[in-house]
Image: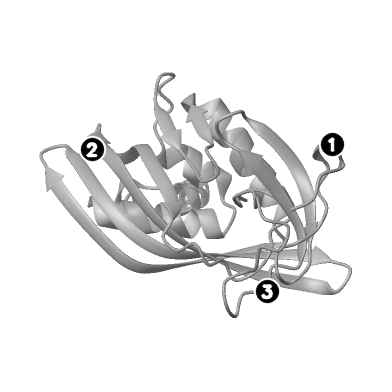
Amino acid sequence: MNAVRCLAWISLALFITTLPTAAAEPSDPESAIRRLVRANAEKDLPTLSHMMAHDADIISYGVAGRKYVGWPELEQGMKEEFLNAQKLEISIKELKVWTKGDLAWYAMELDYIRYVTDDAGLKKTVLPMRETGVLERRAGRWQLLSWHESFRSAQLSGPLTSPPTVVSARTSENAQAPSGVDLSGEWEIIEVEDDKRYKATFDKNGNGPYTQHGGRF
């Protein structure tokens, strides 16, 4: 009998240690934001899902004019990004959080670093981003409701081959890239107003053909 009771206690102890506890939840909005950023970098979709509200009418905005309504659209967008990027790193440069009752809002600057594989190997792209968002404490747990992100600098460090990607169309045949920026590679061109997308292959100065009607920048 004692042996059975001992085994029962051991089993219970092991079970408890494997369960996520309330103490594991971020106790303040800043900790929640940092947890979300880490989960994004680690491609941890279950944690992101757990810490983001799933309200059907919530709207968030990403770069390149992307709009996400509800959780399913955002989840699909993240799945595509996690699949396209071989590796992600996110470095928070500045984070300011304000709190009032069960609501919190934040402004953040970060470097979103993507590694993608091409014929030359692993290519690193640094995207200087800014982001604002709103969190709400629900049943004692901080959840991200809505957010809006954009580039904080027009000078990207290299070409992108998959979302998030944006580049403005060049109207001059001899348009030159900003000094010191190599734009060579394949880009996805997005016309936000008309919701049109096409591919372009640029030289280092940002000149080259694109797929829309055989055009050229």
Residue indicated by mark 1 = 213
Q: Is the C-beta separation of discs 1 and 3 under 8 Å?
A: no
Closer to the chain start, of discs 2 and 3, is 2
Residue at coordinates 44% horizontally, 59% vertically from top-left?
A: 129
Closer to the chain start, of discs 1 and 3, is 3
Q: Is the C-beta separation of discs 1 and 2 under 8 Å?
A: no
Q: Position of residue 209 (x, y in %)?
A: 83, 53
What is the C-alpha distance between the residues marked 2 and 3? 48 Å
The three-letter code of the residue at mark 3 reads Asp
What is the C-alpha distance between the residues marked 1 and 2? 55 Å
93 up-or-down from 14: above or below:
below
The three-letter code of the residue at mark 2 reads Gly
Q: Position of residue 207 (x, y in %)?
A: 75, 62
Residue indicated by mark 3 = 182
Residue at coordinates 54% horizontally, 34% vertically from top-left?
A: 74
Residue indicated by mark 2 = 140
Taking the image as shown, residue 52 lies to the left or right of residue 105, namely right
Q: Quadrant of residue 141?
A: top left
Which mark is nearer the camera, 2 or 3? Answer: 3
